[in-house]
Each structure stands twice: as C-alpha cells, then as structure tokens.
Amino acid sequence: MNKYDTLNDKQREACFYTDGPLLLLAGAGSGKTRVLTHRVAYIIENGLAKPWEIMAITFTNKASKEMAERVDALIGTGSNVFISTFHSACVRFLRKDIDKLGFTRSFIIYDSIDSKKLIKDIVKRNNLDPKLYKEASILSEINNAKNKLISPDEYYRLSATNFQKRKTAELYQEYQKELKKNNALDFGDLLYYTVELFEKHPEVVDYYQTKFKYIMIDEYQDTNMIQFRIVNLLAKKHQNLCVVGDDDQSIYKFRGADIRNILEFEQHYPKAKVIKLEQNYRSTKTILEAANAVIKSNFERKQKRLWTDNAIGEKISFYNLGNEKQEADVIRDIIIQNERNDIFTYNEQSILYRTNAQSRVIEEKLFASGIPYKIVGGLNFYQRKEIKDVLAYLRIINEDRDDISLERIINYPTRGIGASTVASLKEYARENEINLFDAVKNAKNIDSIKERAKNKVYEFYKLIKDLREKLENLTSLGDFTEELIEKIDLYKDLLKDAQKGLEKRDNVNELLGKLSEYSSNDENKTLADFLEDIALISDIDTYDEKSDYVTLMTLHSAKGLEFPCVYMPGMEDGLFPSYMSINEGDEQIEEERRLCYVGITRAKKKLYISAVQSRFLNGNINYNPVSRFVEEIPKNLIEVKYTRQKAETFTARKKAVANKPKPYSFANSSNTNKEKKVIKKQTYQVGDFVKHRKFGVGEVLEVKDAGADCEIKVNFSAKGIKRLMPNLIGLEKLDI
DNA sequence: AGACTGTGATTTTTT
DNA sequence: ATCACAGTCT
C-alpha cells in the first residue's frame, strides 16, 4: 500500500498525468489539495523534476504554508518546492532583476492605504476636485488598467475623448512617477512589472521557463488577465501546466478575476487533458444537495454534479427572525448549546456573512456571553492606524525614500512640525526633484521655514538617524522597536483616546511580540525582511484553527476553508444577494450565487441559515424578503426552526417594528433552556462580586433588567468594564 | 497645537 | 450609525 492508493481513481489519474497541460475541475471538498500535494510528490519521486523545478501558486499565504507542510510530510524532508502566492512569487522575481527596470532591488511595497494617500496628495497638488477624483476610485481605475496591462501612456492615449478620463490618465502617470521616486511598488505593480520584466528581458523569462518544469495553479477560477499572462509566459517552454479550480467558486470578479480563464482553458491549450473531481468528501448529502440545488440556477458554468458517499446528516436549520439582534441571540444560543452538549467545539463553528458590517451585532452578543471568538477580516492588523504608524517609523529607518511613511510620522506624535512646515518641505522636495527625507535633511536651506521649526525638523532628522544607528547595534527587532516606542512616547499619545486607547496599546504590544518572535525565529532576518513579509500578509493568513474560538468572517474570506458547523446569517434579498448586484443584472447575481455556494459547501456536518424581517443597516431599517438563494434550496432539506407570525403587509410590518419586535424565545426547544432557568434564579445587585471564567473576578456596577435576559455591567480588575448576560454564561456569584 | 463641532459621505467582497 | 475631514475655538 503506498500513499497514492488513498486517492480515488480520478484523483490518481490527475496525480499521474504529468505530460502536458491539465485542467482539473475540482468541486468543493473534492480533495484538490490532496491531489496537488500528491502530484508534487509523485513528480519528485519519479525523477520528473527536482523540487525546486516545481512551482505551485496558491491563493493565500496560509494555503502556501499548508501545502508546503503537506508536501514535506509526504516526501520526508524540507522539499524546497517553490510554493507561494502570485504576489509573493512576483516579489521574488523582482527582487532578483528589477534593477533592469530602473528600480532598486530593495524596493518597498505600498499597500492600498499608502497608495490612496499618495493619490490624494497628487490630486490635491494638481488642484483637482477631490470629490470628483476620489482616491479609492482612481486607485481602482489604475489597478484595473494594470490588470489589463495598460501602461500610463497607453491609458492616456485611450482617454482622448473624455476630460475626466484624461485627467485620470495624468494622475496615473504621475502616480507611477512618484512611486518610482519612492522606490515603491503597489500591489498591481508587482504583477505588472513582472510581465514587463519577462517581456523586455527574454533571458530572465527564459531562466524561469527552463527552471520550472512543472507549474500548478490553485484557485484558477479567480485569476485575472495579468496573472494568466504570467502563467502563460512561465509555462511556455515545458507546457506542464496544471490548473486547478472550480468555476462555481469564482467570487473575485470585482478584483479583476476573469472566469473565462478557466472556462476557456481548453481553447488556450488545445491539448489539455480535462479531469473532473466530482466526489465530495467534506459535506453531508443534505448540505451537498442544497449546494447543488442553488448553483444549478447559474447558466454560465461547466457541467458537473458533485456527489458524496457521506451520510445524509441533519437537515439545514432555517430561522426566520424579527431583527438582527434576535438573529445574533439565536446564533449565540445555538453555539453555546452545541458547545455544552459536546456537539461542536467553538472552533468547529464558524459564522459566515456577506458583509463585514454584519459582524458587529454578533460580536457584541458573543462577547457579552464570554464566548471566545475571532473576527477575520475587516481591517487587517497591519492596516490599523497605530500599527501603520509604528511601521512607518520602521519603514523610514529602513528606506528613507519612502515619502508616504515619512509624512505619516514627521509630526506624529506631534513635535512642533506644523502643516505649513511640511508643505514647505514638500515643495522644496518637488522643486529639487528629491525625496522628502532629503528635504528634511536640508531644512536649514529652506527659507520659507521659520527658525523654530527648522530646529524641530533637525531634531526629527536626528531622531531617525540615532534610531538607525541603534538598529545596527541591536539584534532583536522587538527590543529595538520597544525602544523606539519609548523614545517617541507613543503610548502617551495612544492613551489619550479614552475609548480605544487601551486597545491600541494592546495592538502595538502585539506588534512588538510579533517582531520579537520574528527575529528570534531566525536571527538573520532583517528589518527589511520583516517589512516585506508583512506587506503581503492578509488577515486570513493569521487564522489559526488550533485555538478554540468561534470564527467570524466574510464568505469571501472563507474560501478554501471548511468547518463542521456553519452559520450563514443575513440570508435576505438585498443583503445577500446584495442590492448592488440585484440592480446590475444576471451576471452579478450569478457571482453572488457562487458566493452562496461557497458558503454552503464550507459546512461539513451542520448548516444554520437565517433571515430577518427588519435589519438595521447603514443608518436605516431595511425590510427585505428572504433570500432567493434560500428559496432555491429544496424544502425537504430544510427544517424551519423558527418563523415569525405569518406574513404581514408592509405597513403592518413597519408598525410591528415601531413597537419593537418581541424578543425571540424557544418555549419548548432546548435543554439549555432548563439550564438557563436554573441559573436565572440567581439575581445580582450592585456591589456583588462575580467570577467569570475568562475575565476573572469583578464587581457589579449596574444591573439592567431586560426581561428574560438581565444584563449587568461588571468591573473586572483584570479586564476592565464589561457588559454581560449572566444567565447565559454561567457566571459565578461570590459571597464576600 | 489640540480639542471640539458640524458636515457630508459611505454602505460588497480584498490579494 | 459611523467615520473622516474641515473649520473653529481655546
């Protein structure tokens, strides 16, 4: 028995087909990662290629890491297979040869926040109306252009007819010029310049074409045009290109993903072998059937039908509730029930929603009940202001051409370098075509800056210089940054914010921890390495399935993951599918439907879906019908657990909401209810002491009697003031 | 410089 | 509802 025997026939066929292009249509949960890793192992073991002659592209850094681990596990040692995301791969190509394009190999990477700042600056500088030229839309326009390999000059040529387009073209030109001056690349540039490098320098692309005998691309349905181009260039010589994907899971069109890449693969590679993996190993029959039923309504797709040998499993539970708070209550209660009754641990349960905004209410409820949870997404850790500020210092210390970072910190925390001084510095830099840091260095020569300010600028310059020297003598990045933070007295500034100050400080501390860990893991890693590593990190990369918490994330982030138990709240037309897509026609709706398909197929054993009658969103109340996607699931697969009173008229509904929908209650459902009742007898008074399993001991400050769910406010000595629902969390009352 | 206030924009998903 | 930003006041 060898490792390949554990694969099914189709999987094995894909694994052993190593001669020429291969399109692997792998449905959700069909074991595509298994196939990919085994295929790599097979190629190596049979001497078809050395590990470093194989390139595998995954969608996230996390997937890369996982794949590398699994390959290593299969063939023994550290295998040196080139596994990375598109963006990281491009960074590696460019670090080696970007000097051929006029950049320095130590280029830095701008994230979208940096990019937007730069664009905003350029718009302002050109006296354009910021309302007409919003940085976000300009950036997305530029990114779209880059994804289509349209250069600034070409964009300019194409823009002749339209004044605003022409201005945008000029902004694009200036933006690229500015990036170059900063020795910086944005996300789009990483791909764009890679193509440019490959096309202008045949010897470079030839090197990689020869080197990579086998290329595998995961999540191929979400590649865009420029990625397609890179893949083609790399695979040209050996043609051993294996792409894996599922057209039904293409959900990144808004980012330029082109579903035609997978639908038309056979046209691009006429000799391509096509293998379909249709056996699902992940979900119950019920869940899979529901997913199939939903996706069936899409027209533009490859014909296939997933099946499974797994058990029928439980029905999908559907809750139709009054409002989003009740929805969050229900989800919280089920999570607790599942955990207490040893059905699912916390980390086996995940809440997947359409929009990040939905996480808020649910988070509040989970928090109040002391359920451990983690939210993936929203804003990335490294994009938080306080983190970006510290990073800006590190970036300037690392590379002083980084104007955007310099502007971030030149007067933060405030040090008497006011707006007019900064303006003078910037103007001087522009006139002399130098970087802002050089202007800082030469501040004494700038007449428009007052003497007092000049001194301040000099002090700042010296601060950076001192820190840079210090860095050379210090081994640990963590220690260094700690000293940096002390020197600029950052915490003092953070703690000025009464509400979020502590949280911000904690975040900065977390960053310090990451830095220490980073340099202690590998002493040779430099600050530059760290900055590069974090530049391409996404939130999902830090998701850790080992710790025991409930995970909350968007459906997009959930791609590639699986959970025994999945909750999909907010199944309402207008939210999911979003009203944006409803108005924009079938193509958009089909994309939303695929997203729904992705969500359903994340679940292994149990799926809970819910919709609400009225949802408070973006400042007003929305009344939406139950999502069409729910209607597409055959009724026999769904168990309606709770439903509102029969359908009301619109005005009646409005009235009902005005009178506040009564809180939900499951009169006869669960055994937690019994438990609840027992606990409910416990009453609390101001001044009582209580013990919480996570927060420790605290004093009750306030008791709010909200009917069945009494809510108390507790001051925990260790964790500060929290609001809790004592009936749900098994709070222990202490006799003191 | 920093705190405070009002206004207007945002509101789908993100490597 | 929430946030960012500009303008105003101390």
Image (cartoon, coloured by chain):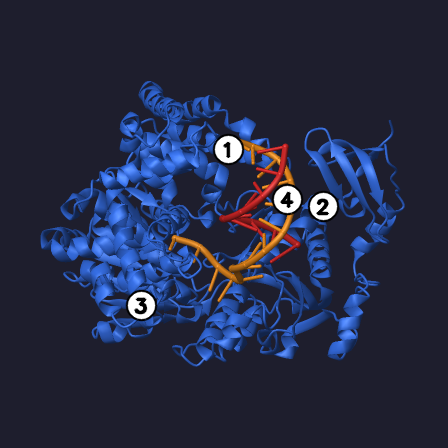
Chain colours: A blue, B orange, C red
Q: Is residue A252 above or below residue A698?
A: below
The chain identifier of the residue carrying mark 1 reads: A
Q: Which residue is mark 2?
A: A368
The chain identifier of the residue carrying mark 4 reads: A
Q: Secondary structure at mark 1?
A: helix
Give the foreground label among 2 and 1.
1
Instruction: Kindly report the distance in space between the C-alpha atoms of the residues bearing marks 3 and 1.
Output: 45 Å
Q: Secondary structure at mark 3?
A: helix
> First in sequence: mark 2 or mark 1?
2
Along the viewing direction, whichever of A24 and A170 lies nearer the viewer: A170
> First in sequence: mark 4 or mark 3?
3
**Same-chain status of marks 2 and 1:** yes
Q: Is residue A401 above or below residue A101?
A: above
Residue type, mark 3 in image: Phe
Residue A163's tag is 3
Along the viewing direction, whichever of A587 and A228 lies nearer the viewer: A587
Give the foreground label among 4 and 3.
3
Q: Which residue is mark 4?
A: A372
Give the foreground label among 3 and 2.
3
